[in-house]
Image: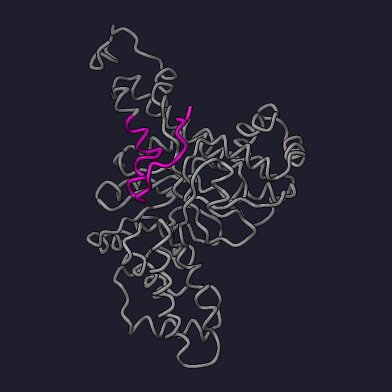
Amino acid sequence: MRAADAGRPGAPAGPSAPDSAAAVLAGLPPLVDHHCHGVVHREPDPGTFAAFLTEADRPPAAGTTFFDTQAGFAVRRWCPPLLDLPAHCPPERYLARRRALGPDETRRRLLSATGIGAYLVDTGLPGDLTGPAETAAAGGATGHEVVRLEALAERSATDHRGPGTDAAEAFLDTLARAVRAAADTAVAFKSVAAYRHGLALDPAPPGPDAVRPAARAWFAAGAPRLTDPVLLRHLVWLAVATGRPLQLHTGFGDPDLRLDHADPALLTDLVRATADTGTDLVLLHCYPYHRQAAYLAAVFPHVYADVGLTLTHVGPRATAVLAEFLELAPFGKLLFSTDAYGLPELYTVGSALFRTALGEVLGGWTASGAWSTADARRVAAMIAAGNARRVYGLADDGPTEPVG
């Protein structure tokens, strides 16, 4: 059947959507998880495990459990078979099997099943977590570092706090050198200004007459956490000057942020201000503002976006969310990430839901005749890996086996 005939009354039936989805995913290259975090080394107790399934920072309401979420159900759908259990087995049985295998074997089994060929790991979170090399090794992949700007600044400040009027000045010099040095080895920087202040930042790079007093005030307050909007802007522009891609948290996260202050549309003036710098901006997660992010990616050449941990947290609705993103986002602008943190299960779930959603969305468009299978497969490969390899300058050095 000709593609032009698809959907016409009386036209012969084309391939089914499931068949089209399988055709789209056939030969999909190893995924590039362009934004993720380390995995805990130790076996978490049941409460700690469940806490990783949510963005909440407090225990669940009395009589409830975080397993009764889309993320919890997704873990029980995709992960038990990899640990020799039936899908959807009770949480207690799953956790018991996990303990029997131990954290190293669990991590190896779950990460090696993701089909991820490269991990870009944000190393800015505290805790006993695997780094880029260890995370990647467990999955038979390659690892790269993403440097979190605020964490870098707070580490740099630690060496300069104390008496003396020149401490803040020395800190600013150390910070500038630290950002330049990090750019030599890291593939990208990341800012969590959305958490520290919100995204409605003055877009202009602050001058020394603003940065120096802000640094002195931060030091005088003795606050370990950097929240000053002038210093946050200073960090952003230090990173932009290196030419490395800059990842920006947008959309939902834990209660440390105000969701309405994390709308990526608030970045519009900063996006305009950085348009001719040669530095790409990558909007992370974006939900529920993914349509705003898609718009920014559509109209500004240096803006890219992902849906990140969104797919894990919306579970079987991942197909609908990804389709909404692809309504407007250019196909060369959307990247894949899991934003997995703490549990290897979140890598497994994030990659499985991504592949499923990608196949269903593009396969549906192929089955309707709107797209050809060849174009759908090409776009799928771009979103899964090609776009990220281009943006971050990665060699095609992942596993050679395609994702089945």
Q: Is residue 281 above or below residue 388?
A: below
Q: Is residue 8 left or right of residue 220?
A: left
Q: Is residue 43 left or right of residue 185?
A: right
Q: Quadrant of residue 254?
A: bottom right
Q: Is residue 310 magenta?
A: no
**x, y percent for residue 305:** 37, 48
**x, y percent for residue 298:** 27, 46
Q: Is residue 396 magenta?
A: yes
Q: Quadrant of residue 382?
A: top left
- Residue nearest the viewer, comparing 385 with 298: 385
**Which residue is found at the position 50% from the left and 93% from the top?**
164
**Which residue is found at the position 43% from the left and 28% from the top?**
359
Q: Is residue 283 left or right of residue 83?
A: left
Q: Tally the marks.
A: 0
Range of magenta residues: 378-404
**Which residue is found at the position 31% from the left and 38% from the top?**
331
**x, y percent for residue 189:** 41, 60
- Residue nearest the viewer, comparing 76 with 142: 142
Quarter of the image for the N terminus: give it. top left
**x, y percent for residue 32:** 44, 42
Q: Is residue 100 above or below residue 225?
A: above
